[in-house]
Amino acid sequence: MSSLTMIQIVQGQLVRYLPLFTTIVGTIGNTLNCIIFSRRSLRRNSCSIYFFASSIGNFFAIYFGCVTRILGSYSINPPLTQMALYCKTKTFLTYIGLAGSAWFIVGACADRYASSASTVRIRSFSQVKNARRAVVLIAILVILVYFQMNFCFDGNVQSANCYPATPFCNTWNDFNLLVTFSLFPPILMLMLGWMTIRNVRVGQHLRRESNFKDRQLTAMLFIQVICTGILTLPISVQKIYSEMTLHQNKTVAAQQIESFFATFVVLLALLNTSTSFYLFTLTGKVFRKELKQLFCTKLRQTTVEPTATLMKMTNRKSVFQIEKH
């Protein structure tokens, strides 16, 4: 078996099983994220608004980026007459999910920076109402930025990926992806994170960050930022290399290796959409507390309701026996 054939087999297995793993763990994790961050004790915190919105964005990326790849790996594709619409729709919704989720995390970083600032005017931006407005604004901007995909993508499907219709579209989309998803947002996250740490160290006398819940949410955010950087920055490397070598003559082996790497980095970015819940559970005590309360409440409800029903039936039986005598 040649090395090229082995690469093709490995690429096919990755496309089939890594998205399946991402879909399963991502669905469970993001569903629990949405439930926990919408609980009363957390939804009044501005940072939780961004985490909730990011989880919603993850659903778009998972179901339009992963599930379609799983189906494609089993040769389950729409009819050729619908292929163009299929490519446009799945690509557009996948990338607004990925970019939206990333920018919501940037918003959370900005919120933590504002909450730790020494200036009252800057701290005033860290409010729930401002977070909700920011989420709506980010969603609108991401949709507008990626709306061009409805014109720049056609129905050519290769290795479960849809490709731009023209070289200009290809260059524009690579640049757009760098600016709005894989490079600029992680850089902003790291910068805002560093500025937040500096604010906390310099302005400890303010005790703004001494609130336990705020500290926990900040720690959860930093871990998410690190994971996002690790899993999304490889796309930047791949896109920059692709543009730099666009007009070079490449061997079949080189093209196959580049195709494998391009597929792998996209799957890594999609994998990032499934990690937040598990990172939050490992790093956030307040998150674990809410998760435990959620399951304990459900357990108590399932235990109390049958018991109450049994007690009612017993009481009715006793009354009936008394009336009978």
Image (cartoon, rainbow, N blue to C red):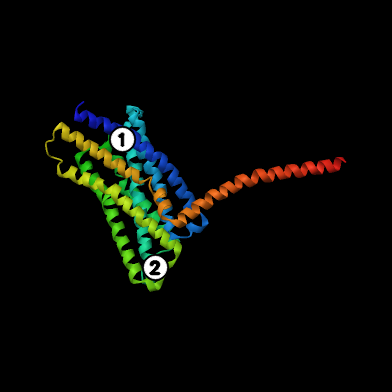
Q: Which mark is residue 123?
A: 2
Say which amino acid is labelled 1: Leu
Give the image location of residue 181, x and y in percent: 29, 49
Say which quarter of the image contains residue 244: top left
Q: Residue sitting at 19 percent across and 27 percent down?
A: 2
Which residue is the extreme one toward the right? 325
Res. 140 in view = yes
The C terminus: image quadrant: top right
Which residue is the extreme one toward the top? 1
Which residue is the extreme one toward the bottom? 205
Give the image location of residue 29, x and y in percent: 43, 45
Element type at mark 2: helix
Using residue 55 as the reference point, say whether residue 251 is left or right of it.
left
Vertical position of residue 162 compared to residue 112: above or below: above
Q: Residue sitting at 56 percent across and 47 percent down?
A: 298
Count of marks, rendered view: 2
Say which amino acid is labelled 2: Arg
Q: Which mark is residue 14?
A: 1
Which of these two is toward me, 223 or 50?
223
Vertical position of residue 206 compared to residue 214: above or below: below
Which of these two is toward me, 134 or 27?
27
The N terminus: image quadrant: top left
Res. 156 in view = no
Which of these two is toward me, 57 or 233?
233
Give the image location of residue 280, x and y in percent: 41, 52
Vertical position of residue 31 compared to residue 10: above or below: below
